[in-house]
């Protein structure tokens, strides 16, 4: 199943993903490291900046503005071009509204930065988006763990990171390598010599932890168990559950080194630095600080739906009506909310990321 069938982020993505912004903000020191290397001897006519898989642009806006400020502090008259890209179904109108109203009072990003130009590209990062040698500094956060398509069904789970299906794990690992090489090859073609690409990506850390599997309830196990209950109650079929596969792969540090060692990339890119980042679930942290259970139960499920709803929807039979499919997915999330109400202290979705800084040779 092709990932583009359900991947485009819904509107108000930023408002529902507080943790994503925390992760992006924490990545700025690595961008600063790249800028300190690039700017002193920069001799290109335009500084190319890009956010791949940008969603509505809100989570990365502060990072982009700080980067633009850093460039201006060194070369105030240097033209900067900023490109936002995502799938065609993405809400690019939201990006436009944000960039034309930075302060909520009608301040445009172009008015704030006279030497800046902006574009948007409704194109998957599985394609080349920018012309060759135009990208000075590329960035992507919490996006490139999505595979181009699921290489097969997972027999015992909805997510390969939690599966014991060895055949599926082999298929997903191979597909992940091929996809990562493809993505990085496109970025290398876009990059200027000496340019950088910072990839902030979900992964598996040295402790074996990954998104939603750090403490308390194992999020993906709970997804699978609740869906299995719906199968037992004949709400959905076993075949439909089999089709609810997240086309994602949480990579290890070794996976990134293997990608740049691939003959397609070995003469193009090098890894400058890889950092682990564990970001506590902001909803759970607020609950622990305030004890406000009602707000937690009301707000936390929304962040899960932003990236999982369509996976469950697409897995349901197309012989069902659109209304029926939506009703079933909403029932699943109602069950998840009920589970949260029964043991709120055990729920939360910590983020596990790798921050990988690549340089064009």
Image: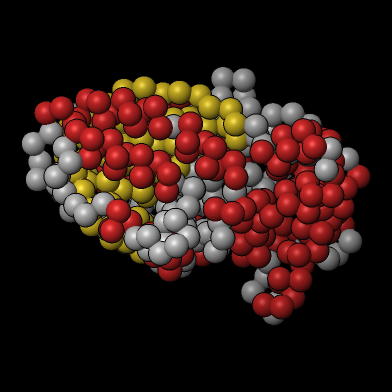
- Pick whichever, 138 or 149, lies toward us: 138
Residue that extends furthest to the front in the rendered view of this protein: 105
Color style of the picture: secondary structure
Q: Judge from the rendering whether residue 318 lies leftward or rightward of residue 258; answer left or right.
A: right
Query: How far from the left and from the top, in percent, is residue 304?
Result: 67, 51
Asked whether residue 292 appears in the rendered view, the answer is yes
At 47% from the left and 38% from the top, the residue drawn is 24
At 72% from the left and 48% from the top, the residue drawn is 300
- Considering only vertical position in the picture, is 136 above or below 304? above
Asked whether residue 152 appears in the rendered view, the answer is no
Count of all numbered marks drawn on residues in the image: 0
- Pick whichever, 163 or 212, lies toward us: 212
Q: Judge from the rendering whether residue 60 lies leftward or rightward of residue 82; answer left or right.
A: right
At 8% from the left and 36% from the top, the residue drawn is 43
Q: Quadrant of residue 110?
A: bottom left
Query: How far from the left and from the top, in percent, is residue 88?
Result: 40, 66
Q: Judge from the rendering whether residue 291 lies leftward or rightward of residue 53; answer left or right.
A: right
- Considering only vertical position in the picture, is 281 above or below 58? above
Query: How far from the left and from the top, in percent, is residue 113?
Result: 26, 52
- Pick whichever, 173 or 182, lies toward us: 182
Q: Judge from the rendering whether residue 79 lies leftward or rightward of residue 277; answer left or right.
A: left
Query: How far from the left and from the top, in percent, is residue 206?
Result: 56, 20
Query: Which image quarter is the C terminus in?
Result: top left
- Pick whichever, 69 or 274, lies toward us: 69
At 54% from the left and 64% from the top, the residue drawn is 11
């Amino acid at each position: 199943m092709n990932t583009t069938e359900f991947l485009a982020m819904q509107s108000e993505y930023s408002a529902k993903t507080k943790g994503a912004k925390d992760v992006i903000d924490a990545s700025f020191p690595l961008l600063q490291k790249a800028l300190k290397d690039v700017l002193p001897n920069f001799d290109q006519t335009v500084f190319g900046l890009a956010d791949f898989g940008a969603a509505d642009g809100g989570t990365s806006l502060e990072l982009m503005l700080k980067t633009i400020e850093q460039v201006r502090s060194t070369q105030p008259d240097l033209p900067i071009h900023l490109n936002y890209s995502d799938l065609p179904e993405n809400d690019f109108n939201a990006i436009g509204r944000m960039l034309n109203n930075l302060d909520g009072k009608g301040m445009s990003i172009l008015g704030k930065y006279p030497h800046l130009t902006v574009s948007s590209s409704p194109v998957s990062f599985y394609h080349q988006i920018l012309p060759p040698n135009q990208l000075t500094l590329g960035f992507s956060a919490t996006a490139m763990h999505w595979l181009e398509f699921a290489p097969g069904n997972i027999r015992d789970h909805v997510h390969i990171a939690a599966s014991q299906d060895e055949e599926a794990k082999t298929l997903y690992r191979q597909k992940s390598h091929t996809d990562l090489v493809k993505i990085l090859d496109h970025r290398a073609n876009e990059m200027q010599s000496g340019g950088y690409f910072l990839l902030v990506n979900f992964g598996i850390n040295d402790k074996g932890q990954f998104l939603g599997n750090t403490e308390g309830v194992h999020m993906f196990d709970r997804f699978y168990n609740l869906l299995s209950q719906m199968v037992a109650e004949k709400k959905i079929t076993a075949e439909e559950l089999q089709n609810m596969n997240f086309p994602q792969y949480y990579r290890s540090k070794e996976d990134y080194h293997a990608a740049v060692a691939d003959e397609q990339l070995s003469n193009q890119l090098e890894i400058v630095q890889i950092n682990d980042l564990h970001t506590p679930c902001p909803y759970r942290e607020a609950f622990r600080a305030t004890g406000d259970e009602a707000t937690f139960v009301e707000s936390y499920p929304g962040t899960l739906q932003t990236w999982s709803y369509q996976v469950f929807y697409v897995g349901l039979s197309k012989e069902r009506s659109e209304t029926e499919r939506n009703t079933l997915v909403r029932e699943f999330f109602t069950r998840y909310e009920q589970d949260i109400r029964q043991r709120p202290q055990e729920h939360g979705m910590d983020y596990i990321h790798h921050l990988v800084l690549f340089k064009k040779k």
